[in-house]
Amino acid sequence: MIACVTIQLGTTIAGVLSEFFGASFYFLLAGCVLGVVCLIFISSKLFSLNEEDIAEKTLQTASTNN
């Protein structure tokens, strides 16, 4: 449900920005936002996890649920 709402909201925002500032501005802004999101992900702990860490966390979670 959230995905359906955000797709329509994103399309509306893209249309409004493109109408006022042009399509090139919208794509520049979208690229900058995507770059910032990628930098946040790379600097997070999630990016630095390896398979052993994931397996260990999975086993810990499974043992606490039983």
Image (cartoon, helix red, strand yellow):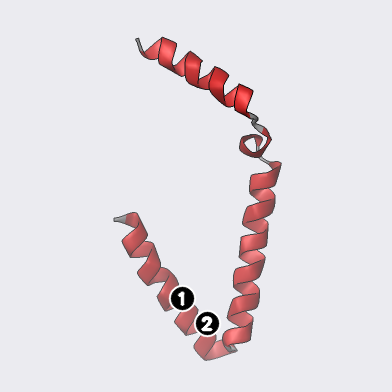
Residue nearest the observer in this picture, 52 or 10: 52
Residue nearest the observer in this picture, 61 or 25: 61
Instruction: Report the residue marked by disc 1.
Output: 13
Q: Which mark is residue 5?
A: none
User: Residue at point 59% right, 70% down?
Assistant: 30
How far across and down, in percent of the image, does residue 63 sit? 43, 10
Real-space CA distance between mark 2 and mark 1, rounded to the nearest whole angstrom: 6 Å
- Is 12 left or right of 30, judged from the image as shown? left
Quadrant of the rendered image containing residue 36: bottom right
Instruction: Report the residue marked by disc 2.
Output: 17
Q: Is residue 8 above or below residue 15?
A: above
Quadrant of the rendered image containing residue 3: bottom left
Q: Amino acid at mark 2?
A: Leu
User: Residue at point 67% right, 61% down?
Assistant: 35
Q: Is residue 65 above or below residue 21?
A: above
Q: Residues within 10 Å of mark 1 (few under 14, many from 20)?
A: few
What residue occupies the far left of the structure in this picture? Answer: 1
Disc 2 element: helix
Q: Amino acid at mark 1?
A: Ile
Tags 2 and 1 in contact by the CB under 8 Å rule? yes
Disc 1 element: helix
- Is 55 left or right of 48, judged from the image as shown? left
How far across and down, in percent of the image, does residue 1 sit? 29, 56
User: Residue at point 46% right, 83% down?
Assistant: 15
How far across and down, in percent of the image, does residue 56 sit? 56, 18
How far across and down, in percent of the image, does residue 33 sit? 62, 64
